Amino acid sequence: MAAVSLSALPLASSLSTFTKGSSSPLLPSSVSFSTPSPRAGGLSVRCVRVGGVEIPNNKRVEFSLQYIHGIGRSRSKQILVDLSLDNKVTKELSDDELISLRDEVSKYMIEGDLKRFNRLAIERLKEIRCYRGIRHEMGLPCRGQRTKNNCRTLKGKRVAVAGKKKTSR
């Protein structure tokens, strides 16, 4: 049986696969796949990509911009004010509004550039052996937090230390 690539076949309303002379009860002689008709709503997927990140379509622009690393609530509000955009649902934005939004977001340091900048700043602190750099190396908080009771996120799981045995009286 010759191998046929599915990508080479045109998409029809139903696809059928036939097997040659196979009457096995486990393998059907034909398989049909139906696609939704355009009047029944159809499948309309439109991904909005801003700053190299796919932002959600069903949320308002102010909140969907926060999915980009480096853009928080205040910066997303500032972007909307600068562009004088209404805070509407992302999928309702026109093409012109999306283009202007992408241009405005590209002015800020976001995603990979921001992560690289922060990583290099921490490496510099480690290299000059300052207090903050040493704390980063040891995996301890470097902004003055207490370490006796908290900071489990940085220190990791507790390690049991063998202590004194309790004496019974």
Image: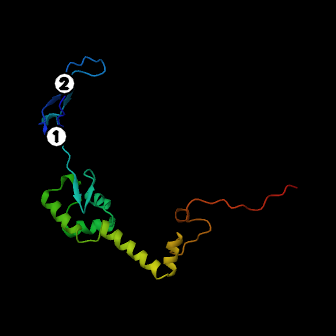
Q: Quadrant of the C terminus?
A: bottom right
Does residue 149 appear to the left or right of 94 in the view shown?
A: right
The residue at the point 35 percent across, 68 percent down is 115
Q: Badge 1 is on which residue? A: 7
Label 2 with label 1: CB-CB less than 8 Å: no
Q: CA distance from mark 2 to mark 1?
A: 17 Å
The residue at the point 79 percent across, 59 percent down is 165
The residue at the point 17 percent across, 31 percent down is 2
- Residue furthest to the front in view is 1
Q: Badge 2 is on which residue? A: 18
Q: Quadrant of the N terminus?
A: top left
Q: Residues within 10 Å of mark 1 (few under 14, many from 20)?
A: few
Q: Quadrant of residue 101?
A: bottom left
Residue 8 lies, in percent from the top left, at 13, 39
- Residue furthest to the right in view is 169
10 and 22: which is toward the camera: 22
Residue 22 lies, in percent from the top left, at 24, 19
